[in-house]
Image (cartoon, rainbow, N blue to C red):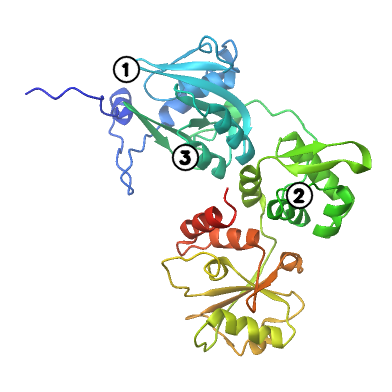
């Protein structure tokens, strides 16, 4: 019986591992993907980390690449390229370009994707560390990756590699392969007050910002604005023009900035209070009207706010409202003519340590809405299909 000729089927390297180690390995995941268990190979490769050398690639990078299934051969960069090396999978008949990075965050991922556009040869990024959003960006553009935490994805004709983190399982020790990263000056993450600077930039990406203008808009010190600007300039997210007090910055890569902010905007300790209110008709407008009549600063956010700008094929079961930190949950519920509940809530009141996240709110057709950036991030983190709706909201509202 002869099989028809065509593209070779993806090689299930898990079976090779099973033969190598004399035991069966699971190849099927609950989501139907071939999950390749690399623990034995990674663990074995770690022992020889310091003895591996390669022109253009660090020893730790070579070790990670050789730890991939399929016995790949690490080589020099392809002729005429500016890559750091190459990786050949003989059995699959594939040669991958290799780019080495110490760390990959969303900004770097967008930069890699931009440089890779139009290239026909597949690219693999090898890194000490990667962030979750950065990995999503790389994979969505067909770029493979492997990092020292055991995260790896390569999806090509004849070759399919996908793993989760091996560090969490205790099967892979980063310190055995990765030398300590060099000390670098601490720069502000886009969280807390710095988050307001990032949001202001995203909301007005065409504006030329001075330090004083940003400090006033975001309600922060010029010193913090300078530190954030410096970090984003170094990452090529901002482009500078001029010198001295008249120096301005514009957003050079809004998509990268939005992804970076969404990843780093770690929420301060927030109080989330579920409640129930009897609402008729436009429930969101009714809640906002009740709170406004009581002079209670608030902003509807998440999916409930997103649907007022973008039509989703969904119903809003729970309306999320960010409310001033100066009132107690009982006072807020009373203002909204609602009662606090543990189950069956159709409202959630969110209070931060201060009112920073209300700074960019706006009144739209009689409803106070959170800033578009805040709406996007809160929708993105909503477990009820929020991520899907947030992506559509982003596409239509921001356009990047």
Q: CA distance from mark 3 to mark 2?
A: 30 Å
Q: Callout 2: few (<14), some (14-19), or many (20+) C-alpha neighbours within 10 Å?
A: some
Quarter of the view holding residue 370: bottom right
Residue 10 spot, x, y in % from top left: 29, 29
Q: Earlier in the sequence, mark 1 or mark 3?
A: 1
The residue at which mark 1 appears reads as 91
Residue linked to disc 2:
207
The N terminus sits in image quarter: top left
Identify residue for label 3.
Answer: 140
Task: Report the front residue among 5 and 339.
Answer: 5
Frontmost of labels 3 and 2 is 2
Q: Is residue 183 left or right of residue 128?
A: right
Indicate the secondary structure of the residue bearing disc 1: loop
Mark 2 or mark 1, earlier in chain: 1
Give residue 248's position: percent from left, percent from top.
83, 43
Residue 47 visible in this rendered orientation of the protein: no
Residue appearing at x 62%, y 39% in the figure = 105
Can you give x and y, in whole percent of width and height, for residue 398 in the image?
60, 53
């Amino acid at each position: 019986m002869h099989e028809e000729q065509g593209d070779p089927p993806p090689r299930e390297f898990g079976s090779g591992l099973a033969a190598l180690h004399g035991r069966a390995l699971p190849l099927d995941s609950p989501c139907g993907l071939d999950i390749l268990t690399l623990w034995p190979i990674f663990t074995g490769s770690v022992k020889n980390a310091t003895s591996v050398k390669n022109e253009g690639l660090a020893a730790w990078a070579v070790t990670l690449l050789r730890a991939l299934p399929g016995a790949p051969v690490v080589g020099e960069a392809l002729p005429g390229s500016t890559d750091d090396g190459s990786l050949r999978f003989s059995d699959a008949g594939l040669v991958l370009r290799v780019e080495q990075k110490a760390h990959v965050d969303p900004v770097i991922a967008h930069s890699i994707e931009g440089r890779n556009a139009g290239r026909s040869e597949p690219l693999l990024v090898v890194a000490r560390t990667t962030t979750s959003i950065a990995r999503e960006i790389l994979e969505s553009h067909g770029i493979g990756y492997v990092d020292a935490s055991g995260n790896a994805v390569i999806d090509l004709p004849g070759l399919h590699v996908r793993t989760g983190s091996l560090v969490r399982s205790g099967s892979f020790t980063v310190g055995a392969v990765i030398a300590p990263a060099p000390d670098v000056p601490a720069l502000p993450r886009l969280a807390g007050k710095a988050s307001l600077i990032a949001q202001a930039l995203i909301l007005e990406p065409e504006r030329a910002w001075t330090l004083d203008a940003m400090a006033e808009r975001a309600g922060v010190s010029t010193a913090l604005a300078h530190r954030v600007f410096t970090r984003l300039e170094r990452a090529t997210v901002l482009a500078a023009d001029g010198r001295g007090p008249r120096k301005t910055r514009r957003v050079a890569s809004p998509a990268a900035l939005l992804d970076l902010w969404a990843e780093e905007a770690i929420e301060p300790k927030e109080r989330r209070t579920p409640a129930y209110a009897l609402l008729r008709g436009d429930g969101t407008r009714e809640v906002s009207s009740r709170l406004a009549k009581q002079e209670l600063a608030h902003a509807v956010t998440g999916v409930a706010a997103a649907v007022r700008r973008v039509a989703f094929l969904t119903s809003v079961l729970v309306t999320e409202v960010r409310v001033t930190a100066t009132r107690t949950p009982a006072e807020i519920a009373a203002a909204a003519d609602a009662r606090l509940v543990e189950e069956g809530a159709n409202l959630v009141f969110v209070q931060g340590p201060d009112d920073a996240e209300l700074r960019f709110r706006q009144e739209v057709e009689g409803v106070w809405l959170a800033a578009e950036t805040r709406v996007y991030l809160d929708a993105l983190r909503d477990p009820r299909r929020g991520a899907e709706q947030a992506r559509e909201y982003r596409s239509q509202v921001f356009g990047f």
